[in-house]
Amino acid sequence: MSFNGEFIMPIKLSENALKEYLFNLYGCDVDICGFWQLGCEKNKGLKDLKGFGYGIPYVIEFRIKGETKRIVLETMRPGGFGHDFPSDRAQILLWQHSAFNNLPRHVRSVDVGAFTTNNERIKSLGDCREFFILTEYVEGKLYHVDLDRIKDSGEATKLDEERCLALSNYLAEIHSLKKDAPGLYIRRIRELVGHSECVMGLLDSYPTNLDYITESDLIEIERKCVEWRWRLKCKTYRLSQVHGDFHPWNIMFREGTDFTVLDRSRGEWGEPADDLTAITINYIFYSLQKYGKLTGVFERLFRLFWENYLQKTRDMEILEIVPPFYAWRGLVVASPIWYPNLSREVRIKLLNFVKNVICEEKFIIDKINLYIQIPNK
């Protein structure tokens, strides 16, 4: 198995190895009832154990002391965005295990472990070759399903607005917890620009000779972000509890406004603008696909989210912080890697948004449809 030229040994997960691992984890015998890819139908046997794949979450159903439980086992897919080596992936998964359970409403991590070099046993840590994380299983539908429905119908329900407010309130709540650690804030701002999963990593992932953005454009975006790093690094008093990757594929709703968040990333503490832009860029993203501009139901949700957040937090300064964070998130949704089927027209407008917003000293909500037009020179 090869990822970006690196040969990766396939994982052969046996039922005996899984039972031994769960026995050591829970301290008693378990009976494996099923093992299947998350999002697929439950299988009756354990045949999927032979087809274990990197980066694919698997549901494990088992019985313990007369109770049926479900957990999710997931590795990280190698290659790109700083995930190239086992040590890269181990660093992320070890951090996730330590951080998931510290954030309200986050799915709980049960354990972090590794597959061993002999490819036959799994254990919590030790003679490791490839790491995995084990989390609790939660029911629900990802938030992007709501946005897909709204895009198809052109209509938003009262519940859609209530869920938008619930997410806005959640960010206002978690961001209210502050931390006095100036060096950590500076690091997070530096990582916004230089981290493999952030601006520079995204820029490196764009193929050459694209017909909708030039290399000189990408260089200019990077240069502007470096300038923003020096502008923001002094604002260390803003360090707050954050999710770090608060987007519709990491939010799972059940009935009403009851939700769980998944896969917080990169740090427990950071700049609140990170979370705000990660979620609200998607209202722009979906509106561009539906209408070609920010309007209609998606504009209503976008404004509702922002207005509620600003009212709850009184953090007007965040409007002077978000431009480089919107640039990063704009590069994500415009990416030919993450969204290969996006139309050229929408991709160009998203990249115009990036190039324009990065030049603004203060983000102005009423100017979004100007930001998506031809970039300022």
Image: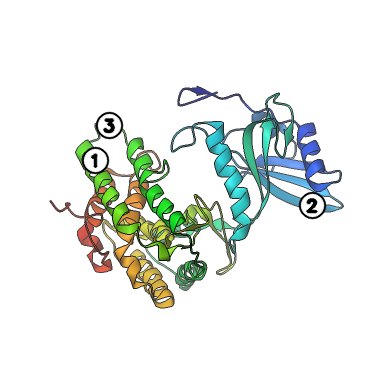
Q: Residue at x 38, y 43 (%)?
A: 339
Depth check: give the residue in front, 81 or 291: 81
Q: Residues within 10 Å of mark 1 (few under 14, many from 20)?
A: few
Mark 2 and mark 1: Cα distance apart in space: 54 Å
Q: Classify 89 as above or below 301.
A: above
Q: Residues within 10 Å of mark 2 (few under 14, many from 20)?
A: few
Depth check: give the residue in front, 119 or 60: 119
Residue 183 in the image, given as x and y percentages of width and height: 44, 55
Q: Classify 70 as above or below 207.
A: below
Q: Circle 2 is placed at which residue position?
A: 68
**Type of residue at label 2?**
Thr
In this rendering, which labeled residue sits more in front, label 2 or label 1?
A: 1
**Circle 3 SS class:** loop
Q: Circle 1 is placed at which residue position?
A: 219
Do the residues bearing badges 2 and 3 touch, measured as CB atoms within 8 Å? no
Mark 2 and mark 3: Cα distance apart in space: 51 Å
Query: Can residue 340 be seen by looking at this rendering?
Result: no
Do the residues bearing badges 3 and 1 touch, measured as CB atoms within 8 Å? no
**Type of residue at label 3?**
Thr
Q: Residue 208: give its label.
A: 3
Q: Residue furthest left?
A: 377
Residue 116 in the image, given as x and y percentages of width and height: 69, 29
Q: Please tell me which of labels 3 and 1 falls first in the chain.
A: 3
**Circle 2 SS class:** strand
Depth check: give the residue in front, 21 or 257: 21
Q: Is residue 299 left or right of residue 43?
A: left
Query: Can residue 37 be seen by looking at this rendering?
Result: yes
